[in-house]
Image: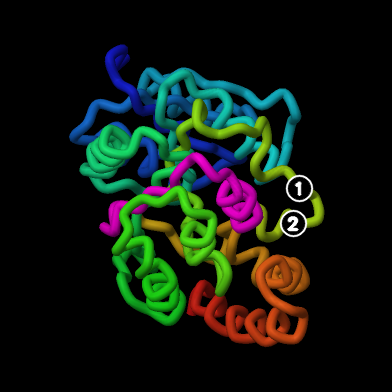
Amino acid sequence: MNDNSIHTFIVLAYKESEYLENAIQSVLNQEYPSKVIIGTSTDNAYIRKFAEKYHLDVVVNPVSGGGNTGDFDFAWTHGSNEIITIAHQDDQYDPSFSKRVVEAYRKYPDSEIIFTDYYEIRNGQRVYHNTLLNVKKILLFPMKLLHSTKSVHWKRSCLRFGNAISCPAVSYIPKNIPFDRIFRQSEFVGVADWYGWYKLSGVKDKAFTFVAEPLMGHRVHEESHTSREIRSNLRTGQEIHMFEKFWPKPIAHMLSHFYSKAQNSNQVK
């Protein structure tokens, strides 16, 4: 399927999400003909049913139930193309997503990651503005002006006041990433993506590239991974540790307080 494509979606499936088929349909319905496979650490009949229905290969993480960070590191290293997007099973991707990412890669081939803006899906409706989304837009403003940068300072401009990069909106360029693992850090499991971008931002000769268009939808619901973490307060201490990578402790604690307030908008009301 799509042998000439340079882009692969790996749909990361976990257990039995009611939104999995919608995610699969959205990545198959792309203007640019991406390759699509399913990745999972919880191989089961439910996932196999959709793989068979849509004639998709399944790659299975040998670490069964490997968790969010283990599954992500497994997924981005198991794509065979130049560009890999890890599609979350609860989310959806606009038809132009692949096309715009491939265009950005061709313009900026030294990119480590290419990420787009995003919107939320709440109760079936698209939401483009709320407290959290607006804060992230402000944090991403320098990247919107730069489009692409290799500067450690400017790459971290969208990380030092909080994590402005949405994980499901990110595409990876494996040949430009000098690590086998990005996410699997046990002490940062609640903010694994934020830590991952911090780690990548320190690579001086590779770029972060931003497509400043909301090209995918992150679904917010009670059983989403993010919502569960926020309810459990897992993130709070780890967010402070992340802020301490950029700021003295008193400022880190203050920023964590305000950032947690913004994160509350992720909860379903």
Q: Seen in the image, is 62 located left or right of residue 173?
A: right
Mark 2, residue position:
188
Q: Residue at point 56% right, 51% down?
A: 201
Within 10 Å of disc 1 (Cα), the crowding (few <14, some 14-19, many 20+) is: some
* Residue 20 showing in the rendered view: no
Q: Quadrant of the N terminus?
A: top left
Coordinates of residue 167 in the picture (x, y in percent): 50, 52
| Type of the residue with mark 1 | Gln
- Which residue is found at the position 65% from the left and 55% from the top? 195
Question: Image height check: is 200 above or below 44?
Answer: below
User: In the rendered structure, which segment of residues is drawn in magenta?
Assistant: 193-215
Identify the residue at image location x=48%, y=65%.
158
Q: Is residue 133 above or below residue 192?
A: below
Per the rendering, the mark at residue 99 is none
**Distance between mark 2 and mark 1 Cα atoms:** 5 Å
Out of 162 and 218, give the one closest to the viewer. 162
| Residue linked to disc 1 | 185
**The residue positioned farthest toward the left in the image shown:** 31
Compare residues 254 and 230 and report the one nearer the observer.
254
* Disc 2 element: helix
Q: Could you tell me which secondary element the residue under label 1 belongs to?
A: loop
- The vertical placement of 73 against 7, above or below, is below
